[in-house]
Image (cartoon, rainbow, N blue to C red):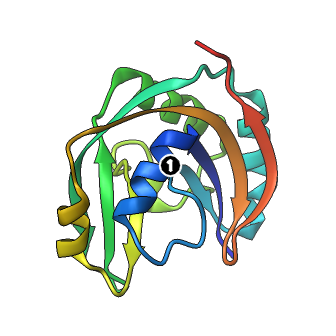
Amino acid sequence: MPVGVILRLDAEAEAALARLGTRLVYAPHITLLRGEDAAEADLARAMAAAEAAAVDLTFASFGLFPGPPTVLFLAPVVTPALLALHATLAAAVPAGVLHPHVQPGAWVLHATLAQDGVDLDAALAGWTGPIAGRGLALELVRFPPPLVLARREMAAG
């Protein structure tokens, strides 16, 4: 089963993203790292060692991963702080552990809104403009179903 290091958002941002999506089984988030079961200990060590401050986010554009399954997502503006957080975590994990989609240089920052049954028209109808928020915590999560294995609050920054 996949396991990942997840950036959790503040409650207001999570609620705003959730209103745009459907069929979410876990709160809106950004996946920073992902591996398979064997990667759990490596990802846990990387998360525990990260000296990370909360990061400001602005979700400003929609995207689709064509799948299967088709995934509708909202993308945050790429900032130096987000890239540095990802790079720090990824550098702490041994080579070959990370899924190719989260490797530095290949990572597509996104918060999933829906999988399969994607209703782009409904999401666009609910869009009122960019969504500001903060990434406040890191979680180590195993999917599916989502099971939080560890949580680390980020410094106020």
Side of 10 relative to 111 (left or right): right
Q: Residue at x 38, y 67 (%)?
A: 21
Percent position of residue 43, x then y? 72, 48
Residue sitting farthest toward the top: 157
Q: Where the N terminus falls, by quadrant? A: bottom right
Q: How many marks?
A: 1
Does residue 40 appear in this view? Answer: yes
Percent position of residue 150, x then y? 82, 48
Q: Residue at x 42, y 74 (%)?
A: 22
Percent position of residue 128, x then y? 21, 48
Q: Nearer the viewer, residue 23 or 86?
A: 23
Q: Amino acid at mark 1?
A: Glu
Q: Nearer the viewer, residue 76 or 107?
A: 76
Q: Residue at x 78, y 43 (%)?
A: 151
Q: Nearer the viewer, residue 107 or 116?
A: 116
Does residue 9 appear in this view? Answer: no
